[in-house]
Amino acid sequence: MAIMTNRRKLLAGLGSSVLLAGCDSWSRNERVREILASAEGLTMRAQRLITDREALAREFTLAEISPRFRANGSRTAETAQGRDYQEMLANNFADFRLQVDGLVQRPLSLSLADLRSMPSRTQITRHDCVEGWSAIGQWKGTPLSRILDLAGLRDNANYIVFHCADTYGAQNRPYYESIDLIDAFHPQTILAYDMNGDVLPEAHGAPLRARIERQLGYKHAKFVMRLEAVESFDNIYGGKGGYWEDVGDYAWYAGI
Ligand SMILES: Nc1nc2c(c(=O)[nH]1)N[C@H]1C(S)=C(S)[C@@H](COP(=O)(O)O)O[C@H]1N2
Ligand SMILES: [Mo]
């Protein structure tokens, strides 16, 4: 197995055998391996010595679901894909198409029916907001890895940007977020269309919101309209990779 050999070589270079545990899962993805082997991967490998970014977030039972899950940040959106958001919502997002573009081999335009017909993942996880509250909810959606595999990332794609339908704050800046490919291919990273067994409510980001379970709440983009694969986010909005990263002093990497 050539894949394992390369990885073993890489990890042997780090002088650690502990990291070999669980290495036969999602990190088989070729692009993730390339990054781990690259110069920029040095930082990530260093990080992996401290925390294993492949580890799964804790999952809970149905009985542990919070009776109330607060909605935070934007509770609605204004315009979505050139249409009135309320109109789209009233129409059950029949005309909604998730755009997947940027550094991909095959740009995609996926309806909710397309996404619902793809393999799904359901998980009960705890949402941790940086403001100090948490809530446990059940999320069902399409693994981001499936969508990225369909689109085919180009070699220079390093990050996935989530473009949202809402604006936030006094300046009405568009909300957006971004993650690296380690998180993008993490098995618990999904675009959720259901919450607690029902269709995702408006206030929680209908029709699609990201769940990135190893990251703090502000990374979990709601009202996701478009995924863009990029080499860097230098030229996207404020250049720091996310709304709160640009506007406040929130860290781009919000791993938990
Ligand atoms: N598009 C968009 N996504 C967003 C936000 C937002 O204002 N707009 N707020 C973020 C923050 S700070 C948190 S804690 C969660 C809240 O998700 P919830 O409304 O489902 O609780 O969404 C995150 N994603
Ligand atoms: Mo948050």
Image: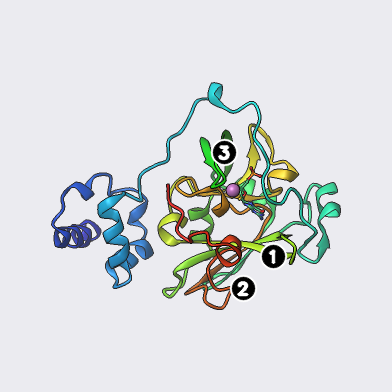
Tell me the quadrant of the picture where the N terminus can be found.
Answer: bottom left
Query: Does residue 49 appear in this view?
Result: yes
Figure check: 232 above or below 244 = below
Q: Amino acid at mark 3?
A: Trp
Q: Residue at x 45, y 58 (%)?
A: 253
Tell me whether the residue at label 2 lies in contact with that at label 3, contact meaning CB atoms closer than 8 angstroms.
Answer: no
Q: Amino acid at mark 2?
A: Tyr
Tell me whether the residue at label 1 lies in contact with that at label 2, contact meaning CB atoms closer than 8 angstroms.
Answer: yes
Q: Would you identify the image quadrant in which residue 21 lies?
A: top left
Lower position in the chain sequence, tag 1 or tag 3? 3
Label 3: few (<14), some or many (≥20) within 10 Å?
A: few
Q: Would you identify the image quadrant in which residue 163 lies?
A: bottom right
- Looking at the image, residue 196 sits to the left or right of residue 159; the answer is right
Label 2 and label 3: CA atoms lie apart by: 28 Å
* Local secondary structure at mark 2: loop
Residue 173: % across, % down: 70, 66
Residue underneath mark 2? 237
Lower position in the chain sequence, tag 1 or tag 2? 1
Residue underneath mark 3? 133
Scheme of colours in the image: rainbow
Label 2: few (<14), some or many (≥20) within 10 Å?
A: some
Residue underneath mark 1? 174
Residue 51: % across, % down: 31, 49
Q: Residue at x 35, y 51 (%)?
A: 53
Q: Would you identify the image quadrant in which residue 221 lies?
A: bottom right
Q: Residue at x 69, y 54 (%)?
A: 223
Q: 197 or 109, which lies in front?
A: 197
Label 1 and label 3: CA atoms lie apart by: 24 Å
